[in-house]
Every structure is written in C-alpha cells, then in structure tokens.
Amino acid sequence: MAHVESAHLVELALRNAAPTDADAEALRHIDHCARCRDELAMLTRLVTAARTAETVDLPTPPPEDVWLRITREVSRETGTPPPPHYPWHDNEPG
C-alpha cells in the first residue's frame, strides 16, 4: 500500500467518524510505516492540544502603545497611512 493520504491521517486523528474498512487498511499500513505513524502521532497531538485549549491559552493583543509603534514604523517604511483602528477592535465603531 502507498503511504496514507494526509487528509486520511487528519480524519484518523480527529476520530469524528465510525471506523471504515479503509481506516483499518490505513492503520495496518501505519503499523509498519514510520513516516505515516509519525505524521499521525503529530496530528493526534495537534488535535488534542486544540480540543483542550482554553481561553487563557489564546494569544492576547499587544498593549496599545506597542501596536501604535508597530503601525507607525510599518507606515513609515511602506509609505501607507496607518490603519484607522486597532485590529482587535473591529466590532467597535471606528
């Protein structure tokens, strides 16, 4: 059997559907293929991390003074005007 398609490995890592005959065949291949086994292990870790993430794990925006310095510097280098508002304030009036 050829290597397991990446999309199929994603489906195996997600475990959202009942196993199929194709899954059983893929798992037999994975038992003997380090490349596919490693990719499935990495995807499984990623799925686990995503499913267990909490709000505290999410990135926070930089302080406003940092954002202002960044936008000024980028605007100066590119010759474009700075954005009218902060990207994390999209739901607020401009």
Image (tube, rainbow, N blue to C red):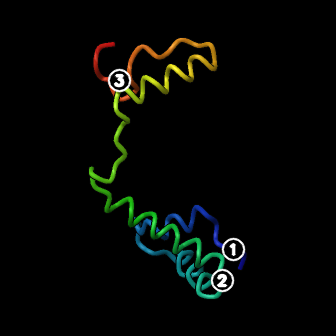
**Element type at marker 1?**
loop
Q: Amino acid at mark 3?
A: Asp
Q: Alpha-carbon distance for marks 1 and 3?
A: 44 Å
N-term-proximal mark, 1 vs 3: 1
Name the one closer to the observer, 7 or 33.
33
Q: Which mark is residue 33?
A: 2
**Element type at marker 2?**
loop
Name the one closer to the observer, 59 or 41.
59
CA neighbours of label 1 inside 10 A, class few (<14), some (14 to 19), many (20+): few
Residue at the image point whose x is 36% and y is 36% from the top: 61
**Element type at marker 3?**
loop
Pointer 1: what residue? 3
Q: Which mark is residue 90?
A: 3
Q: Position of residue 32 (x, y in %)?
A: 64, 88
Q: Amino acid at mark 2?
A: Cys
Of circles 1 and 3, which is in front?
3
Mark 1–mark 3 CB contact (< 8 Å):
no
N-term-proximal mark, 2 vs 3: 2
Return the residue found at the far bottom: 32
Of circles 1 and 2, which is in front?
2
Name the one closer to the observer, 24 or 69.
69
Mark 1–mark 2 CB contact (< 8 Å):
yes
Residue at the image point whose x is 46% and y is 64% from the top: 46
Q: Position of residue 77 (x, y in %)?
A: 63, 20
